[in-house]
Amino acid sequence: MRPSRRLAAALVAAVVLVTACGEAGSVTLGPPAEPPVTTGEARVSAVRAPSTTVPATTTTIPPATTTTTIPPTTTTTTIPPTTTTVDPAAPVVLGSVVTDPRLFLLSDSVMGALGYTQQAKQVLGGLGWKVTLDFEESRSTPRAAAVARQRRGDIGQVVVVQVGNNYGGDQAAFGEHLRGLLAALDGVDEVVLLTVQEFRPDRTEVNAEIRAVAAADPERVTLLDWNAAAQADPTATARDGLHLSPAGARLMAELIGGLVGPAPVTPPPTSVPG
């Protein structure tokens, strides 16, 4: 289960990313790095019982009434830090136990800015992921599905997808093509779907289909609302309102990183005594 994955759509204030766009490309970025481990500490506040002044002439109030108002258990409640419950060899990512450190990014030229600006390497590679960024200028959704099928062997357990920036105006057809893309990714444990920047009115149709597809498969698909993030930060896009600025590329990478978390750590092989 993933109790907070629907909050992914609200992660718009989490971080910052970069831009540009260009020719088709596929970039595989650095080896995984060991993720930092953090710990948490619960703080318990003691509640002080109010004092009661009893007149000397009053004999109907037993002395015990001033000592039983606060149960002793109120000072023993603790909240264990969640970071201690995750096995670093198989961390929980987006609700699934992920052991494959490969992270595949599939998009058109918009997400390509994460490669141009090195944000995929710096942010996602910095989390230990072995990142492959496959993008193409003016890539359609059917073309993205074809690439997913062709490169299935390069795809691990987590895929991040943004399509629809080259929308042709047929909402029903786009929805069908998007479902076809998800079918091409059958067997992938976690798919992160980004909404598109609504720089034109018809992009609301694209996002409606993206949300519908995500809602239809909540155990596997997580929605990342890029449109909300970009609308909240005018510096995230270039003058065309679509392609990413350097700040936008950083923002997108950090939003993705906030969802996928640190890459799984493969434990070293254990030697067996001869």
Image (cartoon, grey):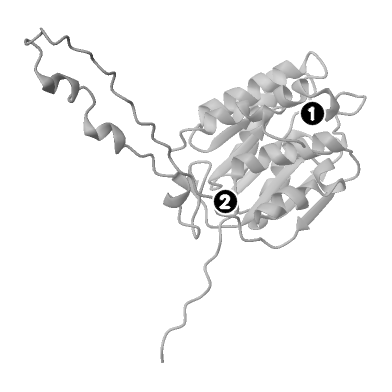
Work out whether residue 195 or residue 231 is closer to the camera in this orientation and state it: 231
Q: Earlier in the sequence, mark 2 or mark 1?
A: 2
Work out whether residue 261 or residue 98 is closer to the camera in this orientation and state it: 261
How packed mark 2 is, by other alpha carbons closer than 10 Å (few <14, some 14-19, many 20 or more), is many
The image quadrant of residue 250 is top right
x then y, percent, for residue 195? 69, 27
Residue at the image point whose x is 55% and y is 65% from the top: 266
Please state, as top left, top right, bottom left or bottom right, where the C terminus lies in the image: bottom left
Work out whether residue 45 or residue 132 is closer to the camera in this orientation and state it: 45
x then y, percent, for residue 19? 86, 38
x then y, percent, for residue 34? 62, 61
- In this view, the residue farthest toward the bottom is 274
* Distance from Cα at disc 2 to Cα at disc 1: 25 Å
Q: Is residue 247 above or below residue 114?
A: above
- In this view, the residue farthest toward the front is 56
Q: Is residue 140 above or below residue 62?
A: below
Work out whether residue 252 or residue 68 is closer to the camera in this orientation and state it: 68
Residue at the image point whose x is 64% and y is 45% from the top: 159
Q: Which residue is mark 2?
A: 157
x then y, percent, for residue 80? 39, 44
Q: Seen in the image, is 87 located left or right of residue 121?
A: left
Q: What secondary structure is marked by label 1? A: loop
Please state, as top left, top right, bottom left or bottom right, where the N terminus lies in the image: top left
Q: Which residue is mark 1?
A: 165
Q: Amino acid at mark 2?
A: Gln
Q: Seen in the image, is 267 located left or right of residue 103?
A: left
